[in-house]
Image: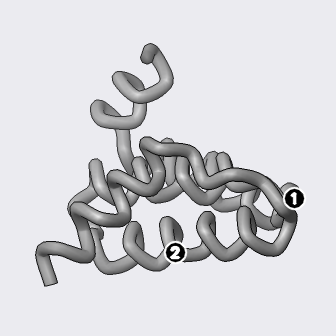
Amino acid sequence: MDELKHRSKQPRLAISIFQPNVRTFPESVNVYDSLADGLLAAGDTAAALAELRMAVKVANRTGVSVPAETQQKLNALEARK
């Protein structure tokens, strides 16, 4: 919860932290979801949508379940289109 609160107050800082995490941990669903949260907080819905889609691809590729929250955010953004 504190992490989300921090991201919403300083989204560019959060993005700068999460982008290297994506490169370091490319098989982690969570890093794409976290980056998407930062991008959403910064108002970049197109990039957030791309990261959420990547989270789902990584989950499917690695055999991990897509977290319900990730799927909900993805569904909400896709419904806006």
Question: In the rendered image, which residue does mark 1 sit on?
Answer: 24
> Which residue appears farthest toward the bottom when viewing the image?
81
Q: Earlier in the sequence, mark 2 or mark 1?
A: 1
- x%, y% of residue 55? 62, 65
Determine whether 48 is above or below 8 in the image. below
Q: Looking at the picture, which amino acid does disc 1 mark?
A: Thr
- In the rendered structure, the answer to whether residue 43 lies left or right of residue 21 reads left
Q: Quick one: 74 or 3, which is closer to the camera?
A: 74
Question: In the rendered image, which residue does mark 2 sit on?
Answer: 53
> Which residue appears farthest toward the left when viewing the image?
80
Q: Quadrant of residue 20?
A: bottom right
- x%, y% of residue 56? 60, 68
Residue at 41% over, 50% down:
38
Q: Looking at the picture, which amino acid does disc 2 mark?
A: Arg
How far, Cα to Cα, is label 2 from label 1? 18 Å
Q: Quick one: 54 or 15, which is closer to the camera?
A: 54
Residue at 61% over, 54% down:
66
Secondary structure, mark 2, is: helix
Q: Which mark is residue 37?
A: none
Secondary structure, mark 1, is: helix
Mark 1: few, some, or many residues within 10 Å (few <14, many ≥20)? Answer: few
Report the coloring of the rendering: one colour
Residue at 37% over, 64% down:
74
Q: Quick one: 11 or 57, which is closer to the camera?
A: 57
